[in-house]
Image (cartoon, rainbow, N blue to C red):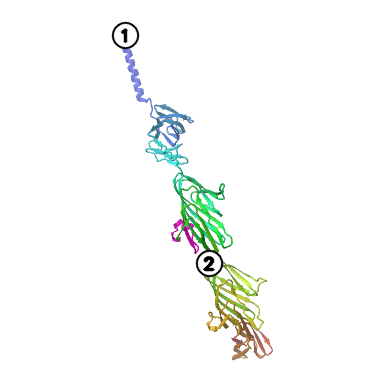
Amino acid sequence: MNKNLALTSLVGALTLSALSHAAETQTPANPPPAAVTLDGLKIIGELSGDQAVFTLTATARVENPKGGSLELLSGTVALSEVGPHLKWHVRAEQNRFILVFERGGKFPIQLKFNAAVRDHEGWKSVDFHVAPSALQTVVLRGLAPDTQFNFPGAARPERKDNAFLSFLPPDGAVNLSWKQAPTETEGKLFYSAEMLSQITVSPGLMRQVALLNFKVMQGELNRMTLLLRGSGEVTRVQGDQVLAWNVEPAANSADRRLIVQLNQPQKDQFALQVQMQTPLGAFPQLADALRLQAEGATRFAGYFRIVNEGAVRLEVAQASGLSQISPEQFPESDATRAALRVTGSQRFAYRLSGPDFTLRIQADQIVPELGVSELLGYHLGENELAIDAEFELEIRDAPLRELSLRVPKGYALARLSAQGMSDYFLREPPDQPEAELRWVYGQPVTGRQVVQLRLENNKPLGETVWTLPRIEVARAKSVRGHLAASADAGFRLTAERMQGLTEIATAFFPRKVAGIQAAFRLSDPSWQAALRVERLPQTVQADVLHLFSVGEGIAYGSSVVNFVVSGAPMQSFKVELSDEYFNVEFTGKEIRNWQNTDGGYVVQLHTPVPDAYTLLATY
């Protein structure tokens, strides 16, 4: 009985085992996980002290509609927060966190976890592993800009927007170590300053440009304070490190302080450029240079250069605390050539060895020395008087900005030619016997300048003695030149009264002049001349050639008349012709019209003929 029961139990057990084995062979108990991938994986770490908090965001893509799983995180980490998770959950195992999805699709993932921070020889490190994906971005916050990193396999962390940015290696391993750079102790500030300054004195203004080169040997400079002593104003402060500047009065003193705020602390070399100016009164003038001193500098030295601009003569009246050097020893570079341009003819250079100095400058005006060589041509016409003048100016010692001439009243300016002229003014003061012609140059001129002008008076002389009006250049130191007198045909000019002039042959006049009758050389700038005017008697000589041709019922004729006029010019010609001729026409130069009169015709001309003239008559 017992043996039968034992046999029955054994057979049942074998049957159940066989059935179970068959079931395991047909359907596995643990199906393999479906493929799950991550897109846009990003880890943001907040590192402070001994804590490291990371936030992981990504998008999970599950291809299998029945779901799947993915080992997202592993290592010495602790999960602290899980974002909204519909249709998926996190399964925690031994130092592993697995995402389990119930169905296929795309699922946003957001996890927050803490990583264990280990210290070793001043380095802090974390070590964990995330699921690999195409591009894994890591952002590290809470670290100083000078933090040092050791991140094997990852991209070198770069500083961006108060954080460090890197990318994980392809296998997703995060083996990050970092160390805070040692804090630099701030020492006492030591710096030196060197100044290259140029003072330019021009009429009415003294400009000063200072190039300051600073070198910080210890500490750092957030702002620069410069002490100003003397009259004058700061007009501009330039430099790559300049953020703002302001001038403030110094406490308990008449001095002022120029405060330059720098855009960042300076620990090495930097440069500033300061522009100043001081208004000057009427020359002569005694002016003190504006003193610029770097406050708190361990060493302050430099160089001064003093130059003139325009018609100014300089003299250094006092230079205490300075050593005069040759102008060629003034340090030159591309920066000084661009900022400190030398324009004048005078240069003084000094070396500065300390902040205590005095520089006083004596300035006086230079009057340009003007030499004039002139050619004057006076012309007498039937109904006008004209003066052609050419002045060759030699300007020395100082540039010339404008020029004035004393010209006779009643004359109009027909032409004025002067190189570089900007504008001119002609006025006739009622309280002066002469008019004033003044022209202004666009830029100051020096050296040789040529001026040409023509004055006209559209009135006949009406007198037998012509007193030549004088044209004078104001403030001319020396005057030399020649004078010529010419007239239209029919006038004879003879010298009546001369003073300060030497008569010369007309062929020796430096320029060819039509109708010239008298020429003189100037021996005194205040010359005087009077010419007697005589009208010559008029004589006309005619040479005539007649040509006739006879046709059927009609005769044609033409006459060529060659006139030779001497004395006064001819305004019209009278030609006698019998009344039996008709279709009469006249051809010739400057013919205005012709009129039929008793016994012939009168031919009127536009311009009087002074000498030879040819007239053709056809009839």
Q: Which residue is mark 1?
A: 2
**Disc 1 residue type (three-letter):** Asn
Q: Which residue is mark 2?
A: 398
Provide the secondary structure element on which disc 1 rests: helix
Q: Is residue 477 magenta?
A: no
| Foreground of the two, 287 or 310 | 287
x, y percent for residue 63 = 42, 34
Is residue 332 within the magenta segment? yes
Label 2 environment density (alpha carbons within 10 Å; few <14, some 14–19, many ≥20) = many
**128 vs 482, nearest the viewer:** 482
* In the image, farthest residue toward the top: 1
Name the element at disc 2: strand
- In percent of width and height, residue 609 lies at 61, 84
| Vertical placement of residue 53 versus 161, above or below | above
Residue 28: image quadrant is top left
Q: What amino acid is labelled 2 in the image? A: Ala
* Label total for image: 2
Residue 207 spot, x, y in % from top left:
53, 58
Q: Quadrant of the C terminus?
A: bottom right
Left or right for 616, reference 269: right
User: Which quadrant, please, contains the N terminus?
Assistant: top left
Q: Residue furthest right?
A: 598
Disc 1: CA contacts within 10 A as few (<14), some (14-19) or many (>=20): few
Which region is colored magenta?
327-350
Q: Nearer the viewer, mark 1 or mark 2?
A: 2
Q: Give above or below for 442 relative to 114.
A: below
Residue 158 shows in the view: yes
Q: Residue at 57%, 83% (x, y): give it.
A: 518
Give coordinates of residue 568: x percent, y percent. 63, 86
Q: Is residue 411 above or below residue 576?
A: above
Q: Nearer the viewer, residue 525 or 161?
A: 525
The answer to which image quadrant residue 438 occupies is bottom right
